[in-house]
Image (cartoon, rainbow, N blue to C red):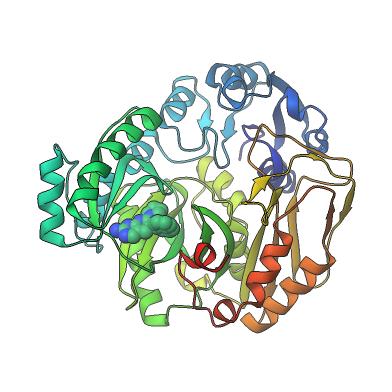
Amino acid sequence: MFSKILVANRGEIALRVIRACRELGIQTVAVYSVADRDASYISLADESVCIGPAEAAESYLNIPRIISAAEITNVEAIYPGYGFLAENSHFAEVCRDCKIEFIGPSPEAMRLLGDKVEARKLAIKAKVPVVPGSEDALETEDAAASYAAEIGYPVILKAAAGGGGRGMRIAHNEMSLRVAFHSAQNEARSAFGNADVFIEKYLEMARHVEVQILADKAGNVVHLWERDCSLQRRHQKLIEESPSPSIDDKVREELTKAAIRVIKAAKYVNAGTVEFLLDKNNKFYFGEVNTRIQVEHPVTEMVTGTDLVQWQLRIASGEQLKLRQKDIKRQGVAIECRINAEDPYNNFSPSPGPIKEFIAPGGLGVRLDTHAHAGYVISPYYDSMIGKLIVHKPTRVEAIACMKRALQEFKIGPVKSTIPICLEILSHPQYVKGNVDTGFIERTW
Ligand code: MV4
């Protein structure tokens, strides 16, 4: 196992990783921007290094500064977390060149799966269903129109270099498709430096279900069941749960097997997620692979009793998975609510500033992953997520009741938070039935 690693992230995930390292006896180096210099989780690391000003491009996204911090503190590995450099294959390559272990997949696997056209081809090769569409990027507007005529409207254009819903356009007829083709290309070019777009039949009322994977360097791959992430707004997930309330054991079996086939075909190593879209008839289709630990990983940790971050560290250090598939049991139901410093009644606008009141919930089955506390100042420079409230109970009915109780106990002020909207959703009959799709929040609020 490593003796010292650098945590190349901030906020709740940095704290989450420092905790895992402490339990494994690994020393930690925290890096921070000037905006985070007073954050209390930094003092839980063994060492810390200021890597630049508040702007992410000058700090958490700045590869030379992070590598320099790693070299002067003599760490063996870098943990990327989510966001920032977590899915940057160039960064993973620089780490390799500097003989620092990147705690994640190989640069080759990241590059392959980061290209959504290549990832889709890989899924086809692995005999995993994909939504009807173009196998390659579209060369011309006419090519887009002719594919659309073949598969039928509505269609969706996706950026090859996109993912997570960024760079997508939905078109309901040929005229709007022709316009959307150019705007999708332009957006992809400016956002990702790659204008390639491909087309798929658009699935209406889709649900988003993803399978958690662990894969080691010896080629062992296991799944840790699924998470339902259908409750999102503008591609920001708000509530996640496991197991998915909308699939049965037969679909679950096929979904998890398909996920393992994709991961094996990519020669993937690390924790990862294979995302699927489910249509009205519960037919599933490959979406994309997320090559990082995800925000919502705690729901899987709760239902399986497995520390996924500790496994990432073990896998990166060369340990083999000793988890056997048949021993990875699901127990009960876990639900996560994202606590964002946003005003849900003012178009989810960010609500940064000092936290004066902070009363955390607790009790049986309640987990709170946060770096925030009374006196903490929420920076306007970064993502507005300040924590995650997770509950774990034997049944979904009990989990919902527990989450409502915990959210009611949770007091944060004067900054606004997503607590009240989470409470509203948890009381909505559609949610209680387990019957929501990815458009639910926008249609209902
Ligand atoms: C789709 C889709 C419908 N049809 N693909 C979003 C994340 C990315 N991995 C794939 N995503 C989607 N792909 C087809 N063929 C619906 C989504 C989608 C979505 C689309 C529009 C607005 C909100 C959405 C939320 C989740 C998924």
Residue at 33 percent of width and 73 percent of height: 254
Percent from the top left, x then y, of residue 143? 11, 44
Can residue 196 be seen in this snapshot? yes
Percent from the top left, x then y, of residue 396? 62, 80
98 vs 388, left or right, is left
Numbered label tally: 0
Residue extending furthest toward the front: 175
Percent from the top left, x then y, of residue 162? 37, 41
Looking at the figure, which quarter contains the N terminus? top right
Q: State ligand 1's quadrant.
A: bottom left
Residue at 53 percent of width and 59 percent of height: 232
**Vertically, is 410 above or below 122?**
below
Which image quadrant for residue 195? top left
Residue at 74 percent of width and 62 percent of height: 367
Front-most of 207 and 367?
207
Looking at the figure, which quarter contains the C terminus? bottom right
Front-most of 350 and 106?
350
5 vs 208, left or right, is right
Percent from the top left, x then y, of residue 119? 29, 47
**Vertically, is 100 above or below 23?**
above
Can residue 395 be seen in this snapshot? no
**Vertically, is 431 above or below 233?**
below
Which image quadrant for residue 14? top right
68 vs 190, left or right, is right
250 vs 362, left or right, is left
Which image quadrant for residue 206? bottom left
Residue at 66 percent of width and 62 percent of height: 337
